[in-house]
Amino acid sequence: MSFFSFKKTIPRPRLLLREAARSKKPGAFYEGCHVLWRVIFGCTMRIKAMGLEHLPEVGGYIIAVSHVSHLDPIVVSSLLARRINWVSRIEFYQQVFMRAILRAGGAFPVDRDGAARPTLREGLRRLASGEIVGIFPEGELMSGQKSVLRGAKIKQGACWLAARSGNPLVPVVVLGTDRLATISPWLPAKRGRLWVAVGKPISAVGYTSGREGRNQFEAVMSAEYLRLFRELRETYDLPESIVP
């Protein structure tokens, strides 16, 4: 084994969540990354964003983003002035270095194959303190007919958070990030193209409690994703194939 190699191990979810709960709100590290990515995107990308005026200026809320690339949280974070606490898959915590970056950036883990309640409780804690929680309702990268933008179902963690916390949920659609895997879009000639649509905040208050209420709220969310996708396509003349 090479001297410079690192053993990949996934710490126990509860240990990671305890570390996340003890950490401070995203601070100087997050702010530095925020400025850096704004500069990078400003030099290389043409980002068309609509609906940013819908984002609450104060108070906690959930920002729920469609997911086609691991760059989606970076794009969304660069557009918002306020800091986002992203829910991140536990697999990304394998390396000590990556774990430190995620913790410094205010992220907290979710174990998709384990108990979700500890992660949801941490999300409630952060929402109660007036922070923004970022989540991907699809659970992972989705393409084809599995994408919520083509009518696929979403996971209900975001619905549970919105219902239990009483905080609004803001649906967001990001397009084009899946095409950033080559060098060309990153050249300083603004060849990269990204499109972002932000919906109006949706409240889960008033929906019946339990599974029935979550199903109803999920239907509302899914319809909003389809509407935002249609609006982006119509506004910027995008093909349906813009979603991989």
Image (cartoon, grey):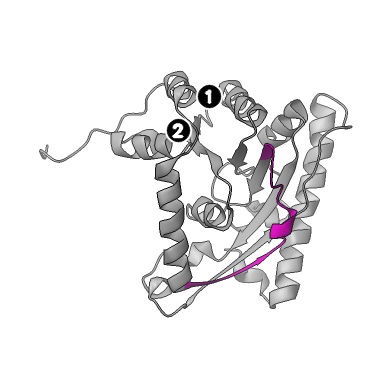
Q: Quadrant of residue 215?
A: top right
Tag 2 secondary structure: helix
Q: Is residue 121 above or below residue 237?
A: above
- Give the magenta range: 45-61
Q: Position of residue 109 (x, y in %)?
A: 49, 31
The structure residue drawn at horizontal position 79% and vertical position 32%, both measured from the top left corner, is 214
Q: Is residue 76 above or below residue 196?
A: above
Identify the mark at residue 242; answer none if there is no mark: none
Give the amino acid at mark 2: Ile
Kindly identify which residue carries mark 1.
114
Magenta span includes 113: no
Quadrant in which the N terminus is drawn: top left
Magenta span includes 52: yes
Report the Cα–Cα distance between label 2 and label 1. Answer: 10 Å
Kindly identify which residue carries mark 2.
90
Most foreground residue, 5 or 30: 30
Left or right: where 67 falls relative to 102: right
Q: Position of residue 113 (x, y in %)?
A: 52, 28
Tag 1 secondary structure: loop
Left or right: where 78 falls relative to 59: left
Q: Quadrant of residue 132?
A: top right
Whether pointer 2 and pointer 1 mark residues with C-beta atoms closer than 8 Å, the reply is yes
